[in-house]
């Protein structure tokens, strides 16, 4: 968190000088006197390290500061976009898992067959399409032509859960399709390895059904890489959501950060990056703890340690 906060603060100061920030804020009201007054008011006249430590000490206390443009609390400005971003990311991850896990299991079970090759071609096809292209195609087909889903009319979840899920389906699917290809290929590779292990051969010799062996004996040890990848992807998924939120006009955290970046509203951008970093750290920690749930050998090793 400390490293990311420093590098982000330093990078943003490289992008925009004090003059460009103040000029953008004042607009047509720019004068030398107004520029000096605003520079002092925002603390931009202080040395770099003084500005950084002042901001970081406030961050530790939970004070995200105030926005440069509206002069309101950064937290008040950003908290309205958090529910939409969380719902978008959660739905995208669920859709990706619901699609990739069955495809990965089938591809591993049918290794080397036409089914395996067809699923592989499908996955590589999804990987080759940029997210914004997928989003435009989904809007054109399912929103404009078929009119099955709305485009740019998202509904908060607690206002109407069913309408909310429907309104978030296309942007979530846009994020999920790229993940589906990655998750499917990862799970297939691990499943193929697990199906060649001695415990699977022993299970087959006992006359257990293929479905039971796949789901009970092969899937759990094959899910470690998928679990790790899913945890690491959460942070990247929030980053990719920035583009999707812009494309589907979702008033989420990502859209607010992007708009603030163009406006050089430094406190908002810094807070957005730190929120994403915090989520990344928490999810990777949870993933590490879940290893013991999936594999008793890890729990036993931790007890011995």
Image (spheres, rainbow, N blue to C red):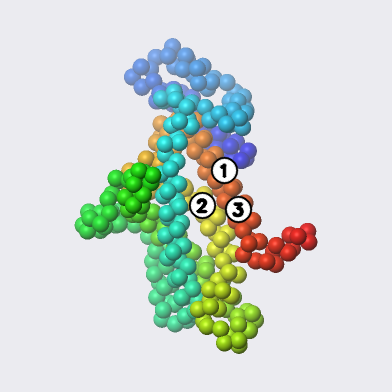
Residue hosting label 3 = 286
- 305 sits left or right of 146 in the view: right
The quarter of the picture where the C terminus appears is: bottom right
Decide: few, some or many residues near mark 2? Use Cα within 10 Å; few <14, some 14-19, many ≥20: many
Distance CA(mark 3)–CA(mark 2): 12 Å
Residue at horizontal 27%, vertical 54%?
Answer: 149
Residue 277 position, x and y percent, is: 56, 44
**Sequence-first disc among 1 and 2:** 2
Query: Which circle, 3 or 2, is nearer the viewer?
Result: 3
Q: Earlier in the sequence, mark 1 or mark 3?
A: 1
In the rendered image, which residue does mark 1 sit on?
278
Residue at the extreme right: 304
Residue sitting nearer the eye, 170 or 160: 160
Residue at 37%, 60% in the rendered image: 129
Residue 168 appears in the figure: no
Q: Name the quarter where the N terminus is drawn.
A: top right
User: Where's residue 230, x and y in %?
Assistant: 53, 58
Residue toward you, 98 or 60: 98
Give the secondary structure at mark 3: helix
Write the residue at 60% across / 88% down.
205
Residue indicated by mark 2? 234
């Amino acid at each position: 968190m400390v490293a990311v906060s420093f590098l982000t603060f330093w990078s943003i100061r490289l992008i925009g000088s004090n003059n460009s920030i103040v000029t953008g804020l004042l607009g047509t009201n720019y004068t030398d006197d107004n520029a000096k007054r605003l520079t002092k008011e925002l603390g931009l006249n202080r040395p770099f390290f003084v500005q950084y430590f002042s901001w970081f000490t406030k961050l530790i206390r939970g004070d995200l500061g105030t926005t440069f443009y509206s002069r309101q609390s950064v937290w008040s400005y950003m908290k309205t976009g958090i529910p939409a971003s969380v719902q978008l990311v959660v739905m995208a991850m669920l859709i990706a898992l619901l699609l990739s896990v069955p495809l990965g299991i089938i591809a591993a079970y049918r290794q080397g067959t036409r089914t395996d090759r067809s699923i592989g071609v499908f996955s590589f096809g999804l990987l080759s399409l940029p997210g914004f292209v997928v989003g435009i195609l989904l809007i054109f087909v399912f929103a404009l032509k078929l009119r099955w889903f709305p485009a740019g009319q998202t509904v908060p979840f607690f206002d109407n859960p069913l309408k909310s899920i429907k309104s978030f389906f296309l942007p979530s699917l846009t994020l999920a399709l790229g993940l589906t290809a990655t998750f499917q290929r990862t799970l297939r590779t691990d499943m193929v390895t697990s199906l060649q292990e001695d415990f699977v051969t022993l299970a087959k010799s006992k006359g257990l059904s293929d479905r039971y062996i796949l789901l009970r004996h092969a899937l759990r040890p094959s899910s470690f890489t998928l679990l790790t990848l899913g945890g690491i992807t959460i942070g990247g998924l929030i980053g990719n959501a920035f583009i999707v939120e812009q494309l589907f006009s979702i008033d989420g955290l990502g859209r607010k950060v992007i708009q603030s970046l163009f406006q050089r509203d430094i406190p908002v951008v810094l807070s957005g990056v730190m929120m994403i970093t915090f989520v990344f750290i928490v999810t990777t920690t949870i993933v590490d703890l879940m290893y013991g749930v999936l594999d008793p050998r890890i729990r036993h090793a931790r007890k011995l340690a």
